[in-house]
Image (tube, rainbow, N blue to C red):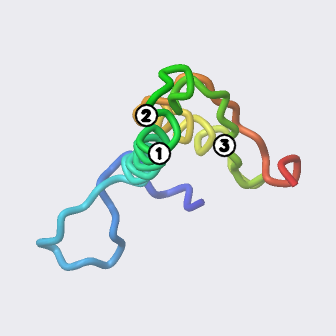
Amino acid sequence: SHRGVDRTQPILPFEAPAEARRVSPVETMARYLRHIREGWNTEMAQDDPDALFQHQEIYLTVPASFDAVARELTVQAAQQAGLLHFTLLEEPQAA
């Protein structure tokens, strides 16, 4: 991570034209997780509310190099995406 970058600010896509719509890295991750949640719910939980993604225990892997701020931003993104039950797990432990 780049410590001098505010990851909550709309800075992506990096090096895009000035008129391009930008989003923050946190919002980008939240959108990605929301997309996965919606896809799961459409395909796997159509007939079973207990199978909804937000009711599952989700493990989000993060690089071991993530500092406390990066981990907290990952938590924020997961919460924005509507995840209720999740655990952060460092990649070496996930393997």
Q: Is residue 35 left or right of residue 73?
A: left
Mark 2–mark 1 Cα distance, whole angstroms, equals 6 Å
Q: Is residue 56 above or below residue 19?
A: above
State the image coordinates of residue 70 (x, y, percent, origin top left). 59, 45
Q: Are marks 2 and 1 in contact (CB under 8 Å)?
A: yes
Q: Which residue is mark 3?
A: 60
Residue 68 is marked as: none
Viewer-closest of 53 and 79: 53
Q: Is residue 14 left or right of residue 63?
A: left
Mark 3 or mark 2, which is nearer to you? 2
Q: What residue type is disc 1 on?
A: Glu
Residue at position x 48%, y 21% in the image: 49
Mark earlier in primary sequence (3, 2): 2
Q: How many marks?
A: 3
Q: Which residue is mark 2?
A: 46
Q: What residue type is disc 3 on?
A: Leu
Mark 3–mark 2 Cα distance, whole angstroms, equals 24 Å
